[in-house]
Amino acid sequence: MENISLIFSLISVVIAAIALGWNIYRDVVVSSRIKVSFSFTYLCGNDGQSNSRHIMLKGCNHRPLKTTINGICCRKSNVFLRLFGKENWRYIKYTKPFYEFSDDIPKQLEQGDDINIFFPKDVGFTKERFTHIGFYDNFGKNHWSARKDVRKFFRELGSEDVGKG
């Protein structure tokens, strides 16, 4: 009879440990999923003709909670800059959209909702070669686009600048 109570106690400890692990995974790992992409895009007018290229910063909420995107952040960083505390951070003040189909910030996102921000190609933050570009949310977390997107963007921007000269 004593062994049965010990077995039930061990089973309850295992179930509690699994529940604790799942809650930590859900709240810490899964809660930080806002997929961000950064690239050039073409915007078409009402006549269907393609205009010049513009910059698009897009984010999609993959977390189970709703979140609010509060702004745009940029960072220039590498191992040496991080080591000596010389990272270059910028928070972009985005008060009014450049285009009527660009979203406002702050914007609340439900699960699966997205935010699309469009900039003209010659906007000020393209002058510095940032390594990270993304959004920051109401939880104080930064969500970065993939570094390969940022590198590709600045490579394309540089090739356009060379073609003008």
Image (cartoon, rainbow, N blue to C red):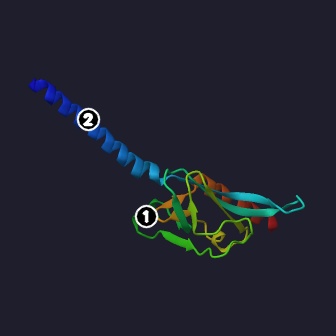
User: How many discs mark residues in the rendered view?
Assistant: 2
Picture quarter with the N terminus: top left
SS for callout 1: helix
Q: Which residue is mark 2?
A: 14
The image quadrant of residue 34 is bottom right
Which residue is at the far left?
Answer: 2
Query: Is 56 left or right of 20, judged from the image as shown?
Result: right
Q: Which residue is mark 1?
A: 82
Q: Which of the pair 116/12 is nearer the observer?
A: 12
Q: Is residue 5 above or below residue 135?
A: above
- Is residue 124 in view from this perspective? yes
Q: Which of the pair 20/3 is nearer the observer?
A: 3
Q: Which of the pair 157/63 is nearer the observer?
A: 63
- Is residue 158 in view from this perspective? no
Picture quarter with the C terminus: bottom right
Question: Which x, y percent locates residue 86?
Answer: 45, 70
Within-10-Å neighbours for mark 1: few <14, some 14–19, many 20+: few
Name the front one of labels 1 and 2: 2
Q: Which mark is drawn over residue 31?
A: none
Q: Amino acid at mark 1?
A: Arg
User: Real-space Cα distance between discs 1 and 2?
Assistant: 41 Å
Question: Which x, y percent locates residue 120?
Answer: 73, 69
Q: Residue at x 62, y 73 (%)?
A: 94
SS for callout 2: helix
Q: Amino acid at mark 2?
A: Val
Within-10-Å neighbours for mark 2: few <14, some 14–19, many 20+: few
Question: Which x, y percent locates residue 96?
Answer: 67, 75
Q: Which of the pair 143/20 is nearer the observer?
A: 20
